[in-house]
Image: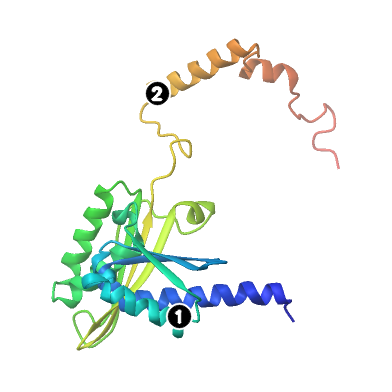
């Protein structure tokens, strides 16, 4: 059985997951993006990220006061103190974009038009790639899915953990539920990758490396010097073909 410390952290993670699901279901029109929960000796600090924070705060703070009561009585969070902020890059947040697509579909816009508009918007914000998958009863009673992709989308490897943001949302229509999945590949840091556009740029990079090596006192290693220090494996004369 897990120890007392392990049970404590498991309960914290379970409470945060339930809170995240509750906020996503009730504030998707506010383009909810995520939540952070920090327990302190004075109470619980809760930071909610949403692209439209006014819908969570409410008129004169009425909505946020009701939310504070729910968090304290239903979720058991002691003395919750809520703070609502906008995310830094809403156009590159998969959850916000998924909720935007869902809201547009629920308002009656055609799903293809909404998907292509979202593709252009996300790619214009600097994303390396984006994939949007819409599934459900789209044009008939038979369920199917359509996938739209632009740029480069990673599905495996360490880049998925570093650059990829994924979110799923659901549009509730009279004919059924339509699922929306958004995958955004965010631009990495300047040192994460190097873009080479032409052979001239390759020569410039090589010359710069050689200059740095000379400045540091190290000798540049060439293919000729490598051949002098490496012996190519060749069959010995008279042994080739022997059994």
The kind of secondary structure element at disc 1 is: helix
Q: How is the image coloured?
A: rainbow
Quadrant assignment for the N terminus: bottom right
Q: Nearer the viewer, residue 89 or 151?
A: 89
Residue 190 visible somewhere in the drawing: yes
In the rendered image, is residue 179 in sight? no
Secondary structure of the residue carrying tag 2 is helix
**Residue lying at 68% horizontally and 20% vertically, measured from the top left:** 226
Quarter where residue 73 is shown: bottom left
Label pair 2/1, CB-CB below 8 angstroms = no
Residue on which disc 1 sits:
72
- Residue drawn at x 49%, y 52% is 162
Quadrant housing the C terminus: top right
> What residue is shown with label 2?
201
Task: Indicate which disc residue 218 carries.
Answer: none
The residue depicted at 28 percent of the width and 76 percent of the height is 63
Question: Residue 212 at what x, y percent from top left?
Answer: 55, 16
13 versus 143 height, above or below? above
Badge 2 density bin: few <14, some 14–19, many ≥20, Cα 10 Å: few
Q: Is residue 149 above or below residue 126?
A: below
Count how many numbered circles sit on residues in the image.
Answer: 2
Rendered residue at 80%/34% (across/down):
240
Residue 99 position in % (x across, y down): 28, 69
């Amino acid at each position: 059985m897990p120890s007392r410390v392990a049970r404590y952290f498991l309960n914290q993670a379970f409470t945060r997951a339930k809170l995240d699901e509750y906020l996503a279901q009730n504030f998707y029109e506010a383009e909810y993006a995520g939540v952070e929960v920090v327990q302190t000796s004075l109470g619980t600090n809760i930071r909610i990220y949403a692209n439209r924070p006014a819908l969570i705060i409410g008129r004169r703070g009425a909505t946020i006061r009701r939310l504070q009561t729910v968090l304290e009585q239903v979720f058991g969070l002691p003395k919750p103190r809520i703070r609502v902020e906008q995310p830094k890059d809403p156009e590159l947040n998969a959850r916000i974009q998924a909720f935007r697509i869902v809201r547009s579909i629920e308002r009656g816009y055609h799903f293809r038009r909404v998907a292509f508009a979202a593709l252009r918007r996300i790619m214009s914000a600097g994303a390396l790639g984006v994939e949007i998958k819409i599934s459900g009863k789209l044009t008939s009673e038979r369920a199917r899915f359509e996938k739209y992709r632009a740029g480069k989308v990673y599905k495996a490897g360490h880049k998925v953990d570093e650059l990829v943001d994924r979110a799923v949302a659901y549009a509730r229509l009279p004919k059924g539920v339509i699922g929306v999945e958004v995958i955004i590949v965010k631009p990495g840091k300047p040192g994460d990758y190097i873009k080479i556009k032409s052979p001239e740029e390759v020569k410039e990079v090589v010359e710069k490396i050689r200059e740095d090596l000379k400045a540091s006192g190290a000798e540049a290693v060439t293919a000729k010097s490598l051949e002098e220090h490496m012996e190519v494996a060749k069959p010995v004369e008279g042994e080739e073909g022997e059994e």
